[in-house]
Amino acid sequence: MNEFAVLSLLGVSALVAVFGYRKELRKSRDCCEALWEQQRRLSESEEAFRAFFEQHCVGFAITDENGRWLKVNDRLCEILGYEREELERLAWHELTPAECLREEMPHFESFLSPRSSNERCLEKQYIRKDGALVDVVVSTKILEPSTKHGVRLASTVHDVSDRKRLLNALAARASELVRHREAIITSMAVLSEFRDGETGEHIRRTKEYVLLLLERAYSDCPARFRGEWGYPREDFELIGSSAVLHDIGKVGVPDRILLKPGPLTPEEFDTIRTHPIIGSYALRKAETTLENAEFLKYAHEIVTYHHEKWDGTGYPYGLAGEAIPLSARIMAVADVYDALVTERLYKKAFPHEKAVDIIASESGSHFDPELVKVFLECAGEFRAISER
């Protein structure tokens, strides 16, 4: 091979080496750029996580499977009253009241089991550094386990103390209003009963009879007395309270008729028969002032229709069957039973057995036959109420 050929080969080899080096250099540069891009994204992710972790609207913590706080944010420190360094030396169960901890620990252990959901949420209390209790809602998620560090859990902690205080205040206010309503209803009912020669015991018994029939009808005959045919279970106490007003219209009946010891004339009886209308009018006037008062709705049904009869021969409107509101049909049974077994100006008290026989004999005429069946099932409890 001549010198020219050798030099040519050497030149080609040099060019190949140069181009290969430049190619490797580009690869290296591309790798560096990719690494820098990954680093930039990682930094951005870390910044985003740090910003989320340190947000001030909610407490945030990372804990291990033993409940020890490994990392906490400023908001959690604020909620619990500790410095960050203090809190990161503690475990959540050390700040949980003993009575709560006994109930919570079995659930926490179950939560860590492999078959459990990896998320849970509960409402609980923590003990602040100053000893005060704080109400919180804790949401916890199990992070991907690390073979090096074990299980890690991420929790958000919401301070709901203000909300709880507000709800407790509202509940106390609602309870106070209920007591006021009960006092007013009872006072009105007692006034009407005193005019009729009765006492507050009739009011107590009437309420208990109505509640007993409501409960039994609801449980024993669900197809008939639930859903669209019945009342919400939570309204039973309201209906029982409203029942004591059933004879409030008697305040409009003259004493010479209301307190007459002997039989009434047809004209006097016609006057007595107006008391449901008088009571209904009084409640309608109240409804114009107290709009959407549920107890007035039930009271109006009972006051207006409790003397109607199943066969349509009652008063004041001659309604029949299920056209009579259920509350009034229940009140009819309760009112008649109490009238039979107690002494009145015009009659002696009947024995319990005779009162039961009379009500049973008027099933389908005076009374709803299904309610009579319910009454017969709990007649013994009626007797116990009447004898208290």
Image: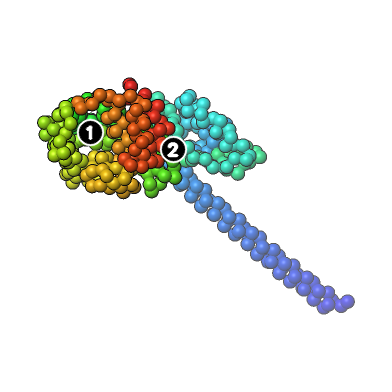
Q: Position of 115 compared to 86: left or right?
A: right
- Residue behind mark 2: 219
User: Are the residues tagged 2 and 1 within 8 Å (C-beta)?
Assistant: no
Estimate the spatial distance between the alpha carbons at disc 2 and disc 1, rounded to whole Å: 28 Å
Describe the element under mark 1 as helix, strand or loop: helix
Q: Amino acid at mark 1?
A: Ile
The mark closer to the camera, 2 or 1, is 2
Describe the element under mark 2 as helix, strand or loop: helix
Q: Residue at x 44, y 38 (%)?
A: 220
Q: Which numbered tag is attached to residue 185?
A: 1
Observer-nearest of 372 and 248: 372
Direction right: furthest residue: 1
Which picture quadrant has residue 79?
Answer: top left
Observer-nearest of 372 and 41: 372
Q: Residues within 10 Å of mark 2 (few under 14, many from 20)?
A: few
In x, y percent, where is residue 78?
40, 35
Q: Residues within 10 Å of mark 1 (few under 14, many from 20)?
A: some
Q: Residue at x 40, y 43 (%)?
A: 225
